[in-house]
């Protein structure tokens, strides 16, 4: 009888350890699935928006109607701030924040996302996509390079900032992005579809970057916990102590 009870207790303990050990893995898988879904949905909406706004007449008329209704002339101060030097300065700030927090690799990942957004946007705009230059006189305007710059910098900063600061930063970034989007249409630089497409592109690239770095970071808490307990990270008895 005692042996049976001991076997039962051992089996229960093993099952409990297995469930406890599986939870972080399940959480990591859920995060990965979420990022993949965001990537697929954002990419799909990006392509659909491009096709509809360029070839589907009702959508094109709506796009241009909003553009003509808001269009005016003036000096957009916020938009003039976008340039290669300002992007380089923003990249340096991202790296400095990450290094100051001891998160150098996170800073590198944020910088790669920022660069990928802007390079991909210029490639798509200049060599892949093409439609009539209705909103501007400089050829294809989809997606907006200015909006990609604002969105990618905001995303990179959000990645490297501490969690306690992300809430306030999100509100400030949303306000700046809204003003930039309005100015892009208001001053006749881009159609609304150009602006929305840029944000979808940044979202997709950000999700891909998060998926690429998420699996490695999800393994760190268990290893850190194991070291604090004085047991190897792969010790099967670590969760039972």
Image (cartoon, grey):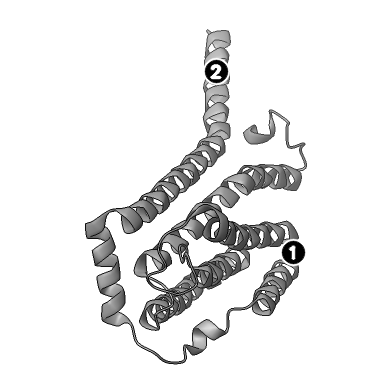
Q: Quadrant of residue 119?
A: bottom right
Q: Nearer the viewer, mark 2 or mark 1?
A: 1
Q: Is disc 2 placed on a helix, strand or loop? A: helix
Percent across and percent down for residue 26 are 51, 36
Q: Is disc 1 placed on a helix, strand or loop? A: loop
Which quarter of the rendering shows the C terminus? top right
Q: Is residue 93 above or below residue 56?
A: below
Q: Quadrant of residue 96?
A: bottom right
Taking the spot 47% from the left edge, 71% from the top edge, the residue there is 170
Q: Is residue 169 above or below residue 36?
A: below
Taking the spot 55% from the left edge, 85% from the top edge, the residue there is 80
Q: Quadrant of residue 67?
A: bottom left
Q: Is residue 10 above or below residue 212?
A: above
Taking the spot 59% from the left edge, 57% from the top edge, the residue there is 123
Q: Is residue 42 visible?
A: yes
Task: Specify which label sits upstream in the sequence, 2 or 1.
Answer: 2
Kindly indicate whether the residue at mark 1 contacts the one at mark 2 (C-beta within 8 angstroms). no
Q: Between residues 82 and 42, which one lies in front from this camera angle? A: 82
Disc assigned to residue 102: 1
Percent across and percent down for residue 211 are 57, 46
Taking the spot 52% from the left edge, 51% from the top edge, the residue there is 207
Disc assigned to residue 219: none
Which residue is the extreme one toward the left? 58
Percent across and percent down for residue 63 are 29, 66
225 on left or right of 20: right
Q: Between residues 37 and 166, which one lies in front from this camera angle? A: 37
What is the tally of numbered marks visible in this picture? 2
Q: Residues within 10 Å of mark 2 (few under 14, many from 20)?
A: few
Residue carrying label 2: 11
Cα separation, mark 2 vs mark 1, equals: 42 Å
């Amino acid at each position: 009888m005692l042996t049976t009870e001991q076997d039962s207790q051992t089996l229960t303990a093993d099952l409990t350890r297995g469930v406890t050990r599986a939870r972080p893995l399940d959480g990591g898988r859920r995060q990965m699935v979420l990022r993949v879904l965001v990537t697929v949905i954002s990419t799909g909406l990006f392509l659909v928006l491009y096709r509809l706004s360029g070839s589907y007449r009702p959508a094109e008329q709506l796009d241009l109607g909003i553009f003509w209704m808001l269009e005016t002339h003036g000096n957009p101060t916020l938009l003039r701030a976008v340039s290669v030097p300002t992007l380089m300065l923003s990249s340096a700030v991202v790296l400095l924040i990450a290094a100051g927090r001891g998160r150098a690799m996170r800073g590198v990942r944020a910088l790669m996302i920022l660069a990928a957004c802007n390079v991909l946007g210029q490639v798509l705009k200049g060599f892949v996509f093409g439609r009539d230059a209705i909103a501007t006189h400089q050829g294809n305007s989809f997606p907006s390079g200015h909006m990609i710059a604002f969105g990618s910098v905001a995303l990179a900063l959000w990645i490297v900032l501490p969690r306690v600061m992300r809430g306030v930063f999100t509100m400030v970034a949303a306000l700046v992005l809204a003003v930039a989007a309005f100015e892009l249409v208001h001053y006749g630089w881009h159609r609304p579809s150009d602006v929305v497409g840029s944000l979808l592109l940044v979202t997709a690239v950000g999700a891909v970057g998060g998926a690429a770095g998420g699996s490695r970071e999800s393994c760190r808490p268990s290893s850190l916990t194991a070291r604090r307990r004085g047991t190897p990270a792969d010790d099967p008895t670590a969760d039972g102590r």
